[in-house]
């Protein structure tokens, strides 16, 4: 597979998939893996990297969940505070597009540019746009990575300079960039699970999730006790614990919240 560097005469840049996978696997931490990703992206002409991992899509209020992981390379570190602490992430048009598509896409914050983010730009996104304009981060390419458990990540490459040329150049290596991003995520998932708290979402035990799943299927506590071979008070204890962790008023609301958070998508205990 071949990619093309930006800003140079078109020439083949061989991409050995096994070599790329090996470099990610050899990195001993998530930070090292991010560094390897950044090096790979520079081969395609990007000079800035933004990576985020989010354990779910929307919280119970319907807002985007703030990412558990936000890694930056060659970006003002204040972005972490603005996106995570001040909630800019929830209003970032790039994130809204990423949730609605599975393919990599080019974006441009110039209001005259009719890229995919244009439909999401409004009064709430003005502070986001201003932050990026002030730092010259006005155009880039984002790869959305939707994962089986409902969590997702995005890999974003940005290049300073003429956005029109960037849009033209990216067509030459979009497939390679997309592949590199997915190869990275496959390896990084292990590091994220090992090094970082995966989620600010409620974390049910396998037994709590199992009991709540049976409750969602219409079984009573007595019936669940037979299914899992545990005493009724034990089942009730698990259901009450799940209800409490989910901040629900009763078991019905707990089931609804667990379904909303895609907790039943996980395998049975």
Image: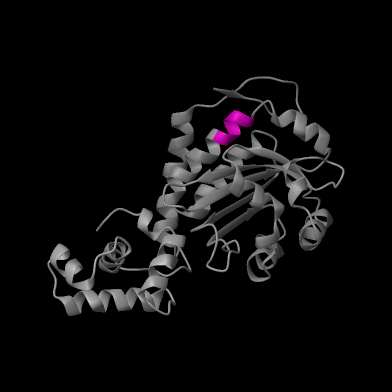
Residue 56 placement (x, y as % from top left): 50, 58
Residue 164 placement (x, y as % from top left): 82, 34
Q: Residue at x 27, y 74 (%)?
A: 238
Residue 43 placement (x, y as % from top left): 64, 34
175 in magenta: yes
Total marks shown come to 0
Q: Residue at x 24, y 77 (%)?
A: 236
162 in magenta: no
Whether residue 130 can be seen here:
yes
| Residue 33 higher or lower than 66, as above or below | above
Q: Nearer the viewer, residue 73 or 100?
A: 100
Q: Residue at x 13, y 66 (%)?
A: 226
Whether residue 27 can be seen here:
no
In the rendered image, which quarter contains the N terminus? top right
In the rendered image, which quarter contains the C terminus? bottom left
Residue lying farthest to the right in this orientation: 112
Give the colouring mode of the picture: one colour
Q: Nearer the viewer, residue 211 or 152?
A: 211
Picture quadrant of residue 10: top right
Region in magenta: 174-178
Residue 76 placement (x, y as % from top left): 72, 59
Give the left or right position of residue 217, taking residue 191 as reference: left
Q: Residue at x 67, y 67 (%)?
A: 87
Magenta residues, dominant SS class: helix
């Amino acid at each position: 597979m071949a990619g093309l560097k930006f800003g140079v005469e078109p020439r083949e840049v061989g991409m050995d998939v096994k070599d790329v996978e090996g470099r990610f696997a050899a990195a001993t931490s998530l930070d090292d893996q991010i560094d390897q990703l950044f090096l790979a992206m520079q081969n395609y002409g990007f000079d800035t990297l933004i990576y985020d991992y989010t354990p779910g899509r929307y919280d119970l209020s319907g807002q985007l969940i703030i990412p558990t992981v936000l890694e930056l390379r060659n970006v003002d570190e204040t972005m972490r505070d603005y996106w995570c602490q001040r909630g800019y992430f929830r209003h970032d048009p790039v994130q809204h597009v990423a949730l609605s598509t599975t393919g990599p896409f080019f974006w441009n914050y110039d209001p005259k540019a009719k890229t995919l983010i244009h439909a999401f730009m409004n009064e709430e996104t003005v502070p986001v746009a201003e932050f990026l304009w002030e730092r010259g981060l006005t155009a880039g390419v984002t790869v959305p990575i939707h994962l089986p458990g409902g969590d997702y990540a995005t890999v974003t490459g940005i290049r300073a300079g003429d956005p029109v040329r960037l849009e033209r150049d990216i067509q030459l290596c979009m497939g390679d960039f997309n592949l590199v991003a997915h190869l990275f995520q496959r390896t990084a998932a292990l590091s994220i699970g090992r090094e970082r708290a995966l989620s600010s979402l409620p974390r049910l035990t396998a037994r709590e999730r199992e009991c709540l799943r049976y409750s969602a299927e219409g079984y009573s506590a007595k019936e669940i006790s037979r299914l899992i071979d545990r005493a009724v008070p034990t089942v009730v204890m698990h259901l009450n614990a799940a209800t409490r962790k989910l901040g629900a008023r009763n078991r019905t609301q707990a089931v609804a919240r667990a379904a909303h958070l895609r907790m039943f998508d996980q395998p049975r205990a």
